[in-house]
Each structure stands twice: as structure tokens, then as C-alpha cells.
Image: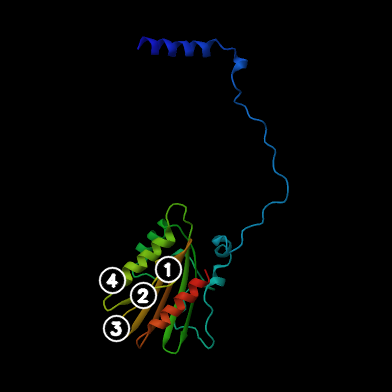
Amino acid sequence: MLGVVAGTCTGFLVQADRAPDKLPSLAQQTLTQAKGPAPEPLSAAEDHSVKTDGDLRKLLLKRPSGAQDPENTVGSDGWLDVAGYAELFTEPDEALGYQIREEFRRAAVTNWSQGTLDVAVTLVQYRQEVNLGASDAASDGYYYADDTAGTHSWAIPGTGDGMAYVHGEEYDEYSAEAHAWRGDVAMEIWLYDIKPIPKKTIMDLAERQMERL
């Protein structure tokens, strides 16, 4: 054991007695900056924010030919601020506080009527600096939609966890809804009619809207 200790001490003394110029330098040579043109900016296909940071209204589904304004039009020029969006909930004051905490950024909306069918499509964008607002919004939609009696549901292809729902009759009215998210944008679709709403109707709208995001 004394031999091990003596060997260790000898090694330490050899290092301590070395002149400073014998030690390897920690300094590195200055790196030259690469020259040439800057890389091309990412396309919308490569960077989701390229598409969603523009006019969000342009990503909404287009009104079908022959569609009319509904009796109650939502939004102003296709936009909803946080207060206007909160008014769509059954408890607006509570919804307003929640949306502020979830870092609501903006919302774009379109709505129309076709015969007895009323359609509303909303894209809600979140800042997502602290919370994952878009996925939280979709999760809330799934929870409350599933909580409605007489509901049938289906996964929306190509959306990960997106879901579409058709509800039974309530107060002489039928309804359907869809929820999904991509990046920082949550999608909501609401349908109302005086007759049952086919699965194909809500699924078609949901799939086509998500293809635009």
C-alpha cells in the first residue's frame, strides 16, 4: 500500500515540477467563418409556422357554392379576439381566464348555412411559450364531446388524435363536432341541423380542413 501511495505522490511531484511551457495549451486556433450564400428559408412544407404565421383566415375552408350567411354570424371580418372566442362557451368569464392562461394568440372563423344545416369552423392559435395550448384545446374538446349522451365518435385520419362526433337529438336539434390540432393551431368544427347529421358530413369537413393546415 505504501508503494501505491509513493507512486501517486511521485507522479504528482513530477507534474508540479514541470515548467509551464511543457503543458499543452488550452487555447484553440481562431475558426474562420464559412463564406457563401445564406441557406434558403424553409418552405411551408418544412416549417409549419411559415404557413400559420400569415393570414390565418386563408387556411379556413372555403364556403361551398350557394352557401348563405347564418342567422347568427360569429366574428368580425373572419377574426375572433380572446373575449369574442370566450363568448362562444357556456361560461364566458371562466373561459376567458382559461384562454388567457393557455396563451391565446388569435382565432379565425368562418360560418355558413346550407338549407337547414349550420356550419362553424374555427382555427385557434396559441403562443405556446409555456403551455401547449393547441393540444390542450383539442383534449378539452374530446373530453366534453365524449361526455354527451347518445354520441358516436371516429378518429380523423392523418391527425394523430383528432376526433369527430355525431350527437343524438337534443331540444329538437341534432349536432356534430370535430376537434384536432397541428403545431400551434387547434381546429374546431360545429354542425347543427333539425335532422340527423351523417358521419360523412362531419368527417369530410374535418379531413379537408386539416389538409389545409
Q: Amino acid at mark 2?
A: Trp
Examine the rendering and report whether any part of residue 155 can be seen. yes
The Cα atoms of the two marked residues, 3 and 4, are separated by 17 Å
**Is 157 located above or below residue 18 in the figure?**
below
Q: Which residue is mark 4?
A: 147
- Of residue 171 and residue 46, the one placed in the foreground of this image is 46
The residue pinned by badge 3 equals 171
Q: Marks 2 and 1, Cα distance to the nearest angstrom?
A: 12 Å
Q: Quadrant of residue 167?
A: bottom left
- Judge depth for marks 4 and 1 and give the one in front: 1
Q: Quick one: quadrant of the N terminus?
A: top left
Secondary structure at numbered mark 1:
strand
* Mark 2 residue element: strand
The Cα–Cα distance between marks 2 and 4, rounded to whole angstroms, is 15 Å
Amino acid type at mark 4:
Asp
Which label lies toward us, 2 or 3? 2
Q: Which residue is disc 2 drawn over?
A: 154
Q: Quadrant of residue 178?
A: bottom left
Query: Given this view, does label 2 or label 1 mark the residue nearer the observer?
Result: 2
Mark 1 or 3, nearer chain start = 3
Is tag 2's residue or tag 1's residue first in the polypeptide sequence? 2
Q: Which residue is mark 1?
A: 180
Q: Residues within 10 Å of mark 3 (few under 14, many from 20)?
A: few
Point 51% across, 72% down: residue: 211
Image position of 42 (left or right of 124): right
Q: Amino acid at mark 3?
A: Tyr
Distance between mark 1 and mark 3 Cα atoms: 27 Å
Give percent across and percent down for residue 213: 52, 68
